[in-house]
Image: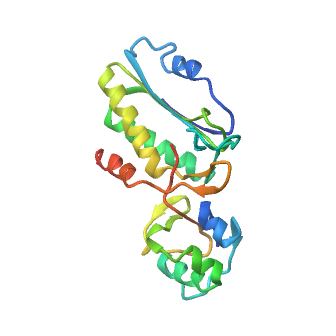
Amino acid sequence: MITVKVQREDFDIGAELAALSDGDTQVGGVASFTGLVRDMAGPHDGDAQSSMTLEHYPGMTEKQLAAIAEEAARRWPLSRLLIIHRYGKLLPGDRIVLVASASAHREAALQSCAFLIDWLKTKAPFWKLEDDGKAQNWVEAKESDDKATERWS
Amino acid sequence: MKLLYFAWIRAKIGVGEEQVALPPNIANVGDLLDWLASRGDNYAGALKERKVVKVAVNQEYVGTDHPVKSGDEVALFPPVTGG
């Protein structure tokens, strides 16, 4: 069972992870990754307030996330899969993304979780606009993210 | 055709979405990008580095030889940076 949510609102990690095994006693483990906004203002920037704004492509985003989750479900024996990704303006410490998978065994859960976040980073149509309190800057895609995705091909 | 632009490509072009009437000689994505780039400095600037312009037709990633037609939804955007 795959759940994909693209939302402006925050989410409750504890409740979301608990839901991945609720009512299913065949689940032996739940693995997760949570992505957070780092503070981009330097230590000497005084009152500068940094933020990050996430833009996305409504419609295609949901399709891509579902396709990524379906690919994980093909590769590993998983009971449930969850992807939550936020958009809009976020502040340092805010949660951006949660990916989680539940399986009978830890290896499938841990590996599929790493796969989900690696694939999501290079395929899901989201873009980050950083604001360090002084200037705005579109985050550039990293070659290391492409390499992280390639290791799963 | 419905055109959508995202992130800095949207910012450089100056609009996020527009409807265009496709000239008859546009057969694929490459033709479309060439034609768009000829529509003004803002388009030319946004599409200058072709290898960082990602294209989706009807919400699926495609290459420059993918065919396009008037009813399509075509999105242009830079490499994605979510997660």
From the viewer's perspective, is residue A93 above or below residue B65?
A: above
Compared to residue B66, the image places residue A111 above or below, namely above
Q: Please indicate, yes or no, whether residue A92 appears anywhere in the rendered image.
A: yes
Q: Residue furthest bottom?
A: B25
Residue in the picture at 58% in, 80% down: B44
- Can residue B4 be seen at all in this image of the molecule? no
A112 lies left or right of A139: left
Can you give x and y, in whole percent of width and height, for residue A100 in the image? 46, 28
Q: Is residue B72 above or below residue A93?
A: below
Where residue A116 appears, as percent x and y from the top left, is 42, 38
Give the residue drawn at x 46%, y 47%: A121
Between B30 and A43, the residue placed more toward the observer is A43
Residue A42 placed where, x, y %? 58, 43
Res. B66 image quadrant? bottom left
Q: Residue at x 56, y 49 (%)?
A: A61
Which is more toward the observer, A91 or B79?
Answer: A91
Image point (44%, 73%), residue name: B64
Q: Position of residue A46 (x, y in %)?
A: 67, 41
